[in-house]
Image (tube, rainbow, N blue to C red):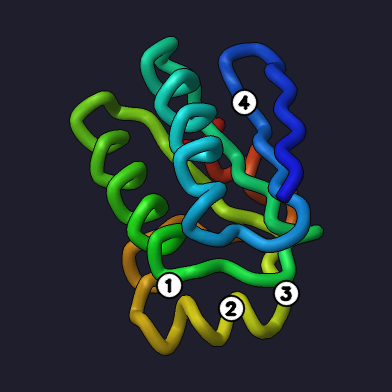
């Protein structure tokens, strides 16, 4: 797994490449929580993600819950068909903010 992070005006874009498996979840968790501590909205770009384990799904839920009291947003974008099916199967699509592109995610964050 590879993580690429960039910050733009109070918005952090975290791109995750490869497979998000249990041994890599802590690395992503650190990036997300550091961004939240700095009161940044986050876009997680999964356009190069091929697999996500249950620990990764749990991290997304926990991160989403941390944003609500802080009035921040985490938006997941760029999911392939298999990841989207997994989100639907686990009903995470009803809890997470999911957009097709980074631009759609940016617009969603700034319109809230």
Instruction: Left or right? Give the position of 6 relative to 99.
Output: right
Disc 4 to disc 3, C-alpha distance? 21 Å
Dot 2 or dot 4: first in sequence order is 4
Residue at 45% x, 37% y is 29
In x, y percent, where is residue 111?
52, 37
Q: Quadrant of the C terminus?
A: top left
* Above or below 17: residue 32: above
Tell which tag, 1 or 3, sits nearer the viewer.
Answer: 3
Dot 2 or dot 1: first in sequence order is 2
Name the outermost residue toward the front.
Answer: 23
Instruction: Left or right? Give the position of 72 relative to 10.
Output: left
Disc 2 to disc 4, C-alpha distance? 22 Å
* Residue, disc 3: 80
Residue at 33% x, 64% y is 95
Residue at 72% x, 50% y is 1
Q: Nearer the viewer, residue 60 or 74?
A: 60
* Residue, disc 4: 12
Q: Are marks 4 and 3 in contact (CB under 8 Å)?
A: no
- What is the total number of numbered labels drawn onto the structure image? 4
* Residue, disc 2: 84
Q: Helix, strand, or loop for circle 4?
A: strand
Q: Are marks 2 and 3 in contact (CB under 8 Å)?
A: yes
In x, y percent, where is residue 16?
70, 48
Q: Helix, strand, or loop for circle 1?
A: helix
Q: Which mark is residue 93?
A: 1
Q: Which mark is residue 23?
A: none
Answer few, some or many: residues within 10 Å of disc 3's Cα (few below 14, many 20 plus, some between 14 and 19).
some
Image quadrant where residue 4 sits: top right
Q: Nearer the viewer, residue 22 or 5?
A: 22
In x, y percent, where is residue 81?
70, 83
């Amino acid at each position: 797994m590879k993580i690429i992070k960039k910050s733009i005006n109070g918005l952090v874009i975290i791109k995750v490449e490869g497979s998000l498996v249990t041994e890599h979840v802590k690395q992503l968790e650190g990036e997300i929580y550091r961004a939240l501590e700095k009161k940044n909205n986050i876009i997680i770009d999964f356009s190069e993600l091929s697999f996500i384990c249950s620990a990764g799904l749990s991290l997304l839920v926990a991160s989403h819950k941390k944003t609500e009291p802080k009035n921040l947003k985490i938006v997941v974008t760029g999911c392939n068909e298999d990841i989207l099916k997994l989100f639907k199967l686990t009903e995470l699509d009803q809890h997470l903010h999911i957009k097709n592109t980074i631009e759609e995610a940016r617009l969603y964050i700034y319109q809230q």
